[in-house]
Amino acid sequence: GQNIDQPTEMTATEGAIVQINCTYQTSGFNGLFWYQQHAGEAPTFLSYNVLDGLEEKGRFSSFLSRSKGYSYLLLKELQMKDSASYLCAVSPNDYKLSFGAGTTVTVRA
Amino acid sequence: SAVISQKPSRDICQRGTSLTIQCQVDSQVTMMFWYRQQPGQSLTLIATANQGSEATYESGFVIDKFPISRPNLTFSTLTVSNMSPEDSSIYLCSVETGNVKNIQYFGAGTRLSVL
């Protein structure tokens, strides 16, 4: 089975930085994904890591350590529109995704 | 990426009835997936639908309850059969385009309420 853990909620101030951690134990590993989901909307793809290290994409960065079963999503220069749920997902094989429960980030003025 | 249209966007149904949800993609894709997202929870994979073969169901989901069709490379349907209030959920389809392996793109979802 798959076990993917991430914090339930985080709160931060506009302009600040927030780091969302994700730990996983899966039967296989074919990549780790982060999705953003605003309330009532579909998840949208943010980032993908398959090798160890940091992937940077504008204000968002994602890090992976395969040996530790650990990833984080870093959100910089937070904006109000970043208030959303952030889903960590692991691909244990060639095509499936297993999702964590999601972290609800609230950005306050 | 891909543009995914899902219909209906929402519905309210009576117990014991069935609802068929449609998912249309703007390009040909090999793999399509159906998920359920219950209120306040994350996504749970129901089944994988490949064109030309039977859908592959995850543990806890059966074909009699959630029959799936995949008649071509751009379209799929999921039927929620003999509905009960416990089936109230958001149902989402997703596709993997194959451009970057395993990245899935999601439709906007169908919000189902069963009375």
Image: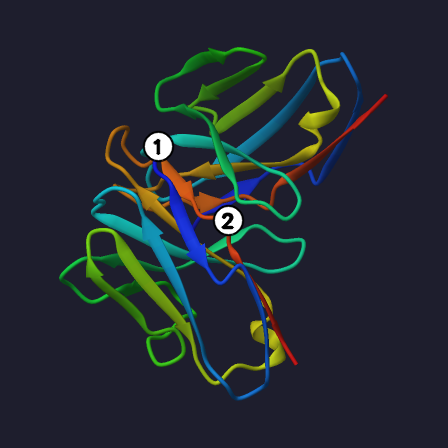
User: In the rendered image of this protein, does residue A83 appear above or below residue B95?
Assistant: above
**Number of callouts:** 2
User: In the rendered image of this protein, does residue B70 appear above or below residue A102?
Assistant: below
Where residue A35 appears, as percent x and y from the top left, is 51, 34
Pinpoint the chain carrying mark 2: B
- Give the position of the N terminus of chain B as an image quadrant: top left
Sequence-earlier tag: 1 or 2: 1
- Residue B105, image quadrant: top left
Give the residue at x 56% y 73%. Answer: B87
Left or right relative to B71: residue B92: right
Q: Amino acid at mark 1?
A: Ser
Mark 2 Cα shell of 10 Å, populated few (<14), some (14-19), many (≥20): many
The residue beneath circle 1 is B1
Q: Amino acid at mark 2?
A: Ala
Mark 1 Cα shell of 10 Å, populated few (<14), some (14-19), many (≥20): some
Left or right relative to B1: residue B13: right
Q: Secondary structure at mark 2?
A: loop
The residue beneath circle 2 is B108
Q: Secondary structure at mark 1?
A: loop
